[in-house]
Image: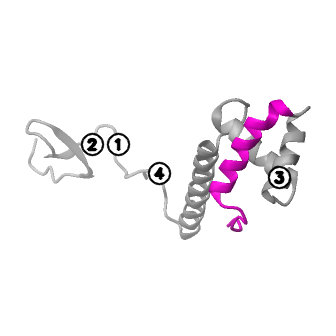
Amino acid sequence: MARPSNYSPELRARAVRMVAELTPDYPSQYAAITAVARKLGIGTAETLRKWVRRAEVNAGQRPGTTSAEHAEIKRLRRENAELRRANEILKASGVSLRPSWTGHRAGDRVHLRAQGPPGRWSAVGCRADLRGAE
């Protein structure tokens, strides 16, 4: 789990907005970042530079993975790892995840029972007692 930030989301947003507003007054964006970081008491200019880059990616001004996409990827990776662990546990316990062969041959009759709406039949995977059916 990530450690909590020393800076509030409001301060981050304000700093990023200030950099965007003051960049034309400075020879480079990094000069504006350094000045804003000093004014707001942000530890290093590099911290603010990362916030600015993240805001640019989220706004679509710079290529990269947005914060929302990053969170979704992280969630999917966590889910994938959980499913892999569950599969390993099932494999170790001997539970088969595939349908097993039941011993039916192509010509065997299978007992039918109604399921769902009337008129729909589906085969139940067991042999029927067909004594005297012929």
Residue at image position (29%, 37%) is 107
Of badges 4 and 1, nearer the viewer stands: 4
Residue at image position (73%, 49%) is 15
The residue pinned by badge 3 equals: 37
Q: Are marks 4 and 2 in contact (CB under 8 Å)?
A: no
Q: CA distance from mark 3 to mark 4?
A: 59 Å
Q: Is the residue 65 above or below the residue 96 in the image?
A: above
The residue pinned by badge 1 equals: 105
Picture coordinates of residue 34, whole percent (x, y) = 88, 47
Q: Is residue 57 magenta?
A: no
Of badges 3 and 2, nearer the viewer stands: 3
Q: CA distance from mark 2 to mark 1?
A: 5 Å
Residue 98, numbered label: 4
Residue span colored magenta: 1-25
What type of secondary structure mainly makes up the magenta span?
A: helix
Q: Are marks 3 and 1 in contact (CB under 8 Å)?
A: no
Picture coordinates of residue 121, whole percent (x, y) = 16, 39
Q: Are marks 2 and 1 in contact (CB under 8 Å)?
A: yes
Report the number of numbered marks.
4
Mark 1: amino acid: Arg
Q: Quadrant of residue 54?
A: top right
Describe residue 50's horizontal placement relative to residue 17 as left or right.
right
Residue at image position (55%, 63%) is 86
Mark 4: amino acid: Arg
User: Which element carries disc 4, helix, strand or loop?
Assistant: loop
Of badges 3 and 4, nearer the viewer stands: 3
Describe residue 116's horizontal placement relative to residue 105 as left or right.
left
The residue pinned by badge 2 equals: 108
Q: CA distance from mark 4 to mark 1?
A: 19 Å
User: Which element carries disc 3, helix, strand or loop?
Assistant: helix
Assess disc 3: are there few (<14), some (14-19) or many (≥20) residues with their C-alpha within 10 Å of its C-alpha: many
